[in-house]
Image (spheres, rainbow, N blue to C red):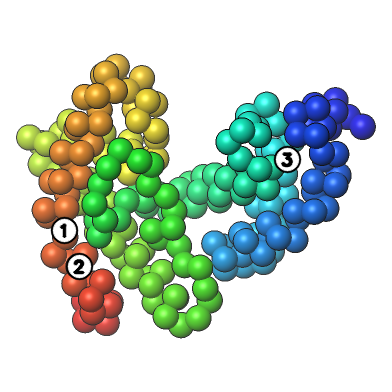
Amino acid sequence: MTNLEQQFKQKTGIHFNKFYRDNKDKLVWYLTKWTRNTDTAEDFAEEAFIQALKKVETYNSDKAQTHTWLYSIAINVVKKDFLDKKKMPLTSIDKRYDDSNTCMEDFLPYQDDKREHELYNENMEKARIIKNAIYNMPPKHEKYKKVLILREIDNLAYDEISEYLGINLSTIKSQIKKGRELIAAKVSTKINYITKHGLDVI
């Protein structure tokens, strides 16, 4: 047993090999719903197990079961790859905004049927529209543009943006909220039209 595996056993109470065997197939099935490709899902699953082994100190039994913790690691692995390749914003203009983190569910399908494929394309088009609107904000809205790029496109957390820009957290949250309102006002008509009628009419 390696040092990392010993740490894993001490932290979780489970032998890593057993943890791997018990969760591998279920995790691949789960990730296939996100990636639409079993081979890709298997690659992400393997990376998730590696991250779980390396970052076992982040596990908190009071907050989550081990498999839930693993799934959250796996989704972060997928999200990072998705962002690196697509660089699309993860925010949905269809939803009311609050201070919670947005998530990838807005722009990835869960099923492989025709309608879900259409939804995927529709949401990617929405993401493109939102992204372009952010990048094309006028100079007078430069401060909102800057924080929106960091939050919605680069997917930085609020505290990371605060540290990066040297601006206090409450101001960052306020600027992001205002920026989202400006973007929503600009693109909501087209976004809602896609939601109701799909892409064929665009």
**Residue at the spot of label 1:** 187
Give the crowd class for mark 2: few <14, some 14-19, many >=20 residues within 10 Å. some
Label 3 to label 2, Cα distance in Å?
Answer: 41 Å
Classify 29 as above or below 159: below
Please tell me which of labels 2 and 1 falls first in the chain. 1
Query: Callout 3: helix, strand or loop?
Result: helix
**Residue at the spot of label 3:** 50
Residue 146, percent from left and from top: 24, 34
Specify the amino acid type for callout 1: Val
Specify the amino acid type for callout 2: Asn
In the shown orientation, is residue 49 left or right of residue 124? right
The answer, for residue 146, to whether it is visible in the render is no
Classify 27 as above or below 170: below
Residue at 36 percent across and 63 percent down: it is 124
**Residue at the spot of label 2:** 192
Labels 3 and 2 touching (C-beta < 8 A): no
Classify 93 as above or below 73: below
Given the current orientation, which residue lies at the most extreme left position?
A: 140
Label 2 to label 1, Cα distance in Å?
Answer: 9 Å
The answer, for residue 138, to whether it is visible in the render is yes
Residue 154, percent from left and from top: 38, 40
Give the crowd class for mark 3: few <14, some 14-19, many >=20 residues within 10 Å. few
Query: Callout 2: helix, strand or loop?
Result: helix
Question: Which of 176/39 is in front?
Answer: 176
Residue at 20 percent across and 67 percent down: it is 192
Specify the amino acid type for callout 3: Ile
Please tell me which of labels 3 and 2 falls first in the chain. 3
Image quarter of the N terminus: top right
